[in-house]
Image: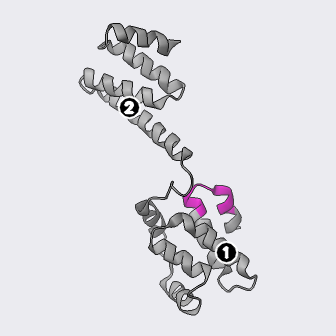
Amino acid sequence: KVIEDCSQAIELNPKYIKCIQRRARAAENIENFELALEDYSTVCFLDSYQPAYIMAADKVLTNLAKHYIETLPPSIAELSKDYVRTSLNEFEDDPIFNSTIINEIRSTQPDSPLARAYQAYDESRFTDIPSLCTQEIELSISSPYKLQALLLRGSFYLLMGNYKEASDDFD
């Protein structure tokens, strides 16, 4: 009702800042982020880019981006290359990226799922890594790299926000 009333008032006076702002807040409350962003952008333009309006627009834009990402299929919602590398580089002695172990895996088992998982990492195909690690884990109970695969898969589950799966792998 608020959006409807404000829309009618805005039709009569397109520069009615308080009404545009009111409609933006109402749209934000019902999670119509597109309309809220449009209205906050209009208010910013009309009212000399006041910091409060810029912050409101930024908040709505963040919510809009989150909503958009949640609706993407996992294959499209790829992890950012910079995010992954920055996050994983925080751990200097992390065994999942120990070059000696990686080189050993690549030389002794070049066609193994774990070797392909490291190749996927090199090519920034991060969403492929958990399934390749799962293949390595299920390959054989006696796989010498099963713990390595669990740790790598758990790390990527963690980065992807799959906390329960990550916790299961780390246990």
> Which residue is at a point 71% across and 80% down the rendered structure image?
139
Foreground pick, 108 / 165? 108
Q: Residue at x 49, y 72 (%)?
A: 121
Total numbered labels: 2
Measured from the top left, where is residue 11 in percent x and y? Answer: 36, 11
Q: Secondary structure at mark 1?
A: helix
Report the residue that reaches farthest toward the right.
141
* Magenta-tinted stretch: 157-167
Q: Position of residue 82 (x, y in %)?
A: 40, 62
Q: Position of residue 20 (x, y in %)?
A: 38, 17
Residue 157 as seen in the image, left or right of residue 11: right
- With 154 as the anchor, is 89 left or right in this view? left
Q: Which of the numbered marks, if any, corresponds to residue 64?
A: none
Q: Which quadrant of the figure has residue 56?
A: top left
Mark 2 crowd level (few <14, some 14–19, many ≥20, 10 Å Cα): many
The answer to whether residue 96 is seen in the rendering is: no
Residue annotated with mark 2: 57
Up/down of 157 relative to 149, above or below? above
Residue 85 visible: yes
Name the residue: 49% across, 67% down.
125
x and y percentages locating residue 19 in the rendered image: 39, 13
Disc sitting over residue 135 in the figure: 1
Q: Is residue 166 left or right of residue 79?
A: right
Of tags 1 and 2, which is closer to the observer? 1
Does the magenta run of residues contain 48? no
Mark 1 and 2 residues: CB-CB less than 8 Å, in contact?
no
Residue closer to the observer: 142 or 117: 117
Q: Is residue 46 above or below residue 6?
A: below
Q: Is residue 44 left or right of residue 82?
A: left
